[in-house]
Image: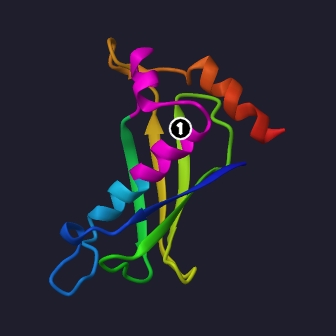
Amino acid sequence: MYEFNTQVRVRYAEADPMNVVYYGNYAQYFEVGRVESLRNLGISYKGIEDMGIMLPVVELNIKYLRPAKYDDLLTIKSQIKELPTDHKIIFDQEIYNEEGKLLTIGKVKLYFMDSKLGKRASMPSSMLEKLSSFFR
């Protein structure tokens, strides 16, 4: 299993007049977690795109447990629990506040897509190589 944590601070524009984070912003927090978890492996979304592969989100499930609030420092835990062997990659994600309370749980499924053909593709071999070491 591969796991990486990253942090974001809730900005004023992400909260409603009650200082509670708008529910739609959690998808963006999850994206930050995914992008940074791959960057930690030496893989960038831009690099994947330069190889002719896109990673569209095809499924997103979110369970809201507690609200995040303006100026909270959030920890986004991103996990890949299974080594991708085909055209999809699944991230299990959780968001915690500074007190360590679990706020939100998410599961995001993305497909590797050939950007020219618009069809499913395999995970780039360089990415498979870097991820494989976490699944031995």
Q: Is residue 5 above or below residue 123?
A: below
- Residue extending furthest bottom? 18
In percent of width and height, residue 135 lies at: 78, 40
The residue identified by callout 1 is 39
Q: Is residue 93 above or below residue 49?
A: below
Q: Is residue 114 left or right of residue 25?
A: right
x 42%, y 83%: residue: 66
Q: Which residue does the image show at 63% across and 35% down from the upper left?
A: 84
In the displayed structure image, the side of residue 18 where residue 111 appears, left or right: right
The quadrant in which the C terminus is found is top right
* Amino acid at circle 1: Arg
- In the image, farthest residue toward the left: 17
Figure colour scheme: rainbow
Please report the bounds of the magenta region as a residue range: 31-55
- On the image, which quarter does residue 20 sit in? bottom left
Q: Magenta stretch: residue 134 in it? A: no
